[in-house]
Image (cartoon, rainbow, N blue to C red):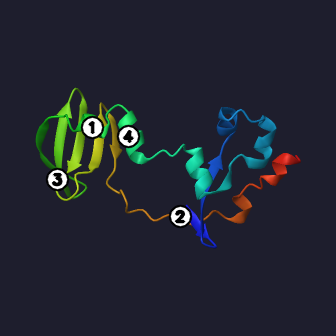
Amino acid sequence: MSTARGEAHAYIKVTARDLKGMNLPSAACAVVCDKYLKISARQSKALLGGAAWSALVERTPGSLAALAQLPYVRTVTVDRQSAWELSADGATAYIAAHGRPYLLRLMTGSDRIDYTKWNSVTIPPPPPASQIADLSQLAHP
């Protein structure tokens, strides 16, 4: 999300698959595919249905509530950070052992998701104007 003239904007990159999922004509792909749509923060919130990270995580298998039920195994180091290893039934979660207990890593079988960069990545700048789709072209292809 970026800010221009005090108003926050989000940029969403559109693919042919996205258009198909939105039941839009494939002809629109010539205008918007592989480009970014610039939308307001209000529009992006509406588009996501007000989804928040916590709501998303709690609806998925392996939610934080379910992870809290995993038995403690040991204290380990994950990305130079002390973590509690919790594990059962092929799922292993690593939770920060100091400060706020947030998820650092989740493993199921051979799949692994790392959360060690949480809140440390900077927001990218807006894409160049040449990569932003002009939605007015959709009305008059």
The image position of residue 49, as x and y in percent, is 54, 43
Amino acid on which disc 1 is placed: Ala
Residue at far right of view: 140
Does residue 16 appear left or right of residue 125 in this picture? right
- In front: label 3 or label 1: 1
Q: CA distance from mark 3 to mark 2?
A: 30 Å
- In front: label 4 or label 3: 4
The residue shown at (41%, 47%) is 53
Q: Which residue is mark 1?
A: 65
Res 51 label? none
- In front: label 1 or label 2: 1
Q: CA distance from mark 3 to mark 1?
A: 17 Å
* Towards the viewer: 66 or 84: 66
Amino acid on which disc 4 is placed: Val
Q: Which residue is mark 2?
A: 124
Res 97 label? 3
- Which badge, 4 or 3, comes first in the chain's sequence? 4
- Which badge, 3 or 2, comes first in the chain's sequence? 3
* Towards the viewer: 32 or 39: 39
Image quadrant of residue 28? top right
SS state under label 3: loop
Q: CA distance from mark 4 to mark 2?
A: 24 Å
- Which badge, 1 or 4, comes first in the chain's sequence? 4
The residue shown at (20%, 59%) is 99
SS state under label 4: helix
Does residue 128 appear left or right of residue 121 in this picture? right
Badge 4 local density, few (<14 within 10 Å), some, or many (20+)? few
SS state under label 2: loop
